[in-house]
């Protein structure tokens, strides 16, 4: 299934449903519906069974008439894994950046979440805005101390992520948190593809374009740390919860590692596409002046 959160035209209320072809079947108003897609995931197998049945009953809306939002607009955690692709590490090594010895995780503050087609902000304070197309893993069960070979059971499904990064702010501290967390710098979607739809998440083509120019063209098979290993590592330290997003790293081709660097500018359009999942596309705009919200 493809599970989406969306806003119908001329309405402010978020809905969710099942994407089928060029339509989305709204299920969020049906009797017994959980309040949000995240709450649906919290019901685990029972929730997925309910939504499969509900998709036969709900009204259909053309996708062209809705605004797709991040599948879980307010995840409790949004975590990213740095240096997880061999090709990305090779280009970083040319600039003198050391290869990590283990998994290096960072936080993207959840206030950075944006929708799959929302505009994203070029910060007023930096000209070093960069893109990173990545496979996102969404957690489907509350879990702790998960073994790598059992991790599939706690995965709800997969999304496309653009791990936008403000490079000079990223390098201010080893945690990378500030440079990874500017508002709007975590677009993901366009929907959640449930785990059963993806035969092998480590065999997907991943591509990123800027203004139609192909910049990244890799495979999730390049991952140095497999998804099960990631979940085992994280749950050794803390609990993962339904709706949490894990961004799993990026292949070669980021603008900041080109010679000379090719950072994003206002007016650029970044498209990230992952085989069998879909694509997100975001226009870079100036950060709004005087925004205090």
Image: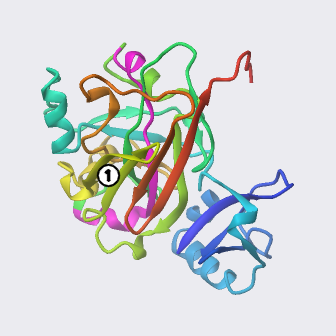
Q: Is residue 170 left or right of residue 116?
A: left
Give the total number of marks visible in the rendering. 1
Give the quadrant of residue 62: bottom right
Scheme of colours in the image:
rainbow
**Quarter assignment of residue 172:** top left
- The residue shown at (13%, 28%) is 93
Residue 168 drawn in magenta: yes
In the displayed structure, would residue 290 be above or below residue 182? Answer: above
Query: Going by the image, does 285 lie left or right of 222?
Result: right
Q: Residue 2: x and y, percent? A: 54, 70
Q: Which residue corresponds to mark 1?
A: 231
**Can you give x and y, in whole percent of width and height, for residue 9 in the image?**
81, 58
From the viewer's side, name the closer residue of 183 and 64.
Answer: 64
Residue 20 in view here: yes
Where does the C terminus fall, quadrant-wise?
A: top right
- 96 is higher (above) or lower (below) than 4: above
Name, please, the residue furthest toward the right: 10
The magenta segment is 149-171
Question: Where does residue 250 sit, x and y in percent of width and height?
Answer: 30, 44
Is 225 located above or below residue 3 in the figure?
above
Q: Quadrant of residue 176?
A: top left
197 relative position to 20: left or right? left
Residue at horizontal 25 percent and vertical 65 percent from the top = 203
**Around disc 1, counting alpha carbons within 10 Å, would you say few (fewer than 14), some (14 to 19), or many (20 or more)?**
many
Residue 89 inside the magenta-drawn segment: no
| Residue at disc 1, secondary structure | helix
Residue 36: tell me if it is visible: no
Residue 115, image x, y percentages: 61, 47
């Amino acid at each position: 299934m493809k599970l989406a959160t969306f806003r119908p035209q001329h309405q402010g209320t978020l809905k969710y449903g099942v994407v089928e072809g060029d339509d989305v079947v709204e299920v969020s108003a049906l009797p017994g519906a959980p309040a949000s897609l995240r709450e649906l995931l919290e019901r685990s197998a029972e929730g997925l069974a309910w939504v499969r049945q509900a998709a036969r009953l709900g009204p259909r809306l053309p996708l062209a008439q809705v605004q797709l939002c991040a599948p879980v607009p307010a995840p409790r955690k949004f975590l990213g894994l740095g240096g997880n692709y061999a090709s990305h590490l090779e280009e970083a090594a040319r600039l003198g950046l050391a290869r990590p010895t283990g998994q290096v995780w960072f936080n993207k503050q959840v206030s950075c979440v944006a929708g799959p087609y929302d505009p994203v902000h070029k910060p007023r304070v930096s000209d070093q805005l960069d893109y990173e197309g990545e496979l996102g893993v969404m957690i489907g069960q509350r879990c702790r101390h998960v073994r790598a070979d059992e991790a599939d059971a706690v995965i709800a499904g997969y999304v496309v992520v653009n791990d936008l990064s403000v490079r000079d702010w990223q390098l201010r501290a080893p945690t990378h948190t500030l440079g990874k967390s500017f508002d709007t710098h975590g677009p993901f979607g366009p929907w959640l593809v449930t785990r059963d739809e993806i035969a092998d998440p480590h065999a997907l083509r991943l591509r990123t374009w800027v203004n139609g120019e192909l910049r990244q063209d890799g495979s999730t098979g390049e991952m140095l740390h497999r998804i099960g290993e990631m979940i085992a590592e994280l749950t050794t330290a803390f609990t993962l919860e339904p709706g949490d997003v894990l961004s799993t790293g990026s292949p070669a081709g980021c603008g900041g590692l080109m010679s000379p660097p090719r950072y994003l500018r206002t007016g650029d359009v970044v498209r990230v596409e992952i085989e069998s999942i879909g694509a997100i596309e975001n226009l870079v705009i100036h950060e709004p002046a005087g925004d205090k919200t």
